[in-house]
Image (cartoon, rainbow, N blue to C red):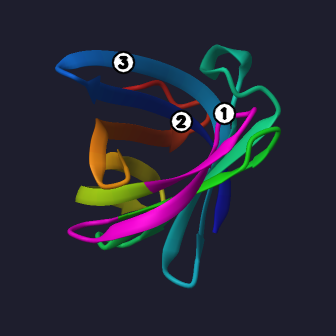
Amino acid sequence: MKKDVMIEITGIQKIDGESDCVELTTKGIFSKTHGNYYIRYEESELTGMENVTTVLKVEGNKRVTMTRSGNLRSQIIVEKGTRHQCLYDVGYDSWVLGVLGASIEPELNDDGGKLTFKYTLDINTMVTSENEVRINIREAGIPNA
């Protein structure tokens, strides 16, 4: 299964009690292979990641792997209750960050659906931010309900 979709993404980041929210609506591809869902889209100048492709692999409610390729390269693994060390490219340098998964809530089916996941980022085990990502996937051409 593979289809063109509209993807609405809301990213919320909390640092030192301050919240920042980024919203993006873009076209992408939603697919399913070996029981896992994949969400693929091109980043834009609005996100500061022009010429970057993001792919999210959703393995049920246990793991989300977000891989970016192109001008920036990174991979973040979010797994509830597990801390992973992940590579994060910020354009001029790469960092190894700790990623501790807080929750993964997929409501996906072959038509699309919703995905929410939360995680913290740390450097040398010191938490730098709390993050929440909300994704709504619908078939291209179908208005948002």
C-alpha separation, residue under disc 3 versus residue under disc 1: 20 Å
Amino acid found under the numbered disc labelled 2: Ile
Q: Which residue is mark 2?
A: 7
The residue located at (62%, 28%) in the rendering is 26
State whether residue 86 is above or below residue 112. below
Residue 27 is labelled as: 1
State whether residue 48 is above or below residue 35. above
Q: Position of residue 108 (x, y in %)?
A: 37, 59
C-alpha separation, residue under disc 2 versus residue under disc 3: 16 Å
Point out the tag, 3 or 1, that comes first from the N-terminus: 3
What stretch of residues is rendered in magenta?
79-97
State whether residue 90 is above or below residue 79. above
Point out the tag, 2 or 3, that comes first from the N-terminus: 2
Other-residue count near label 3 (Cα within 10 Å), few / some / many at <14 / 14–19 / ≥20 = few
Amino acid found under the numbered disc labelled 3: Cys
Q: Answer yes or no: do the residues labelled 2 and 1 have beta carbons within 8 Å?
A: yes
Q: Is residue 25 visible?
A: yes
Question: What secondary structure is the stretch in magenta mostly built from?
Answer: strand
Amino acid found under the numbered disc labelled 1: Lys
Horizontal side of 78 relative to 75 (left or right) equals: left
Viewer-nearest residue: 42 or 124: 124
